[in-house]
Image: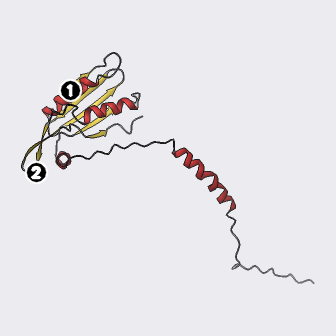
Amino acid sequence: MRRIRKIKVDHNSEFELDLAPLLAVMVKLVPVLLVSSAFVQMMVIETELPQVVNEAIQRQDQQQTPTNVALEVDGKDGIRIVITEKGQEKVETIPLRDGAFDYPGLHQKLIAVKKAHPEVFKIELNPDGKVPYNEIVKIMDEARQAHDTNVKFPVFDTKQGKNVETNYMFPEIIFANMMEG
């Protein structure tokens, strides 16, 4: 009878890892990512706010029932300014003028809102999904600060213990409907 030989398998033996396919993928993927990143533009508007305005924004965040100002932008109806104060809602509408947004009218209404509510530095922006991005940026520019350097708004400075003036209206803009659509 024949004896059956046992095959010895060395489990501790080393093997060589072939990295060529991985390197081939990387060599092809990296240039594609670099080229595609040139077409993607992220814009962040960095503004240095005065310390007094930053403190006012923090105080507004700490309030139990702060006054809330929201801009609802619709390409068909125009812009609605919704002011919620102590549970009461006040709505002002800036209709379209010749089929376009009325930016000077919006700016004047926002100046009036800021004068009526000088403690508010934050607004919510609710644009409709069909409003072009450049229109949203123009609306944000109108809300950020007063164009006329003679128009000033009072801000309480805690360090000096008195009101100081600034031309910033609503420098902190929050997109309130980011999860829609």
Q: Please tell me in which quadrant of the rendered image residue 65 appears.
A: top left
Q: Position of residue 172 (x, y in %)?
A: 26, 41
Is residue 88 visible to us here? no
Q: Amino acid at mark 1?
A: Lys
**Quick check: marks 2 and 1 in contact, CB under 8 Å?**
no
Residue 84 is left or right of residue 37, and the answer is: left
Q: Single out the residue that lies furthest toward the right.
A: 1
- Quadrant containing the C terminus in the rendered view: top left
Q: Position of residue 99 (x, y in %)?
A: 35, 17
Task: Tell me if residue 61 comes above or below residue 126 in the rendering.
Answer: below
Q: Image point 23% across, 36% down: which residue?
A: 145
Residue 102 is left or right of residue 41, and the answer is: left
Is residue 16 visible to us here? yes
Residue nearer the viewer, 85 or 113: 113
Residue nearer the viewer, 13 or 115: 115
Task: Tell me if residue 32 comes above or below residue 110 in the rendering.
Answer: below
Estimate the spatial distance between the alpha carbons at disc 2 and disc 1, rounded to whole Å. 29 Å
Task: Tell me if residue 126 comes above or below residue 162 in the rendering.
Answer: above
Q: Image point 69% across, 80% down: which residue?
A: 12
Circle 2 sits in a helix, a strand or a loop, which is it? loop
Q: Please tell me in which quadrant of the rendered image residue 64 appears.
A: top left
Q: Amino acid at mark 2?
A: Thr
| Mark identifier at residue 109 | 1
Circle 1 sits in a helix, a strand or a loop, which is it? helix
Q: Position of residue 130 (x, y in %)?
A: 41, 27
Q: Which residue is mark 2?
A: 158
Q: Image point 65% across, 59% down: which residue?
A: 23
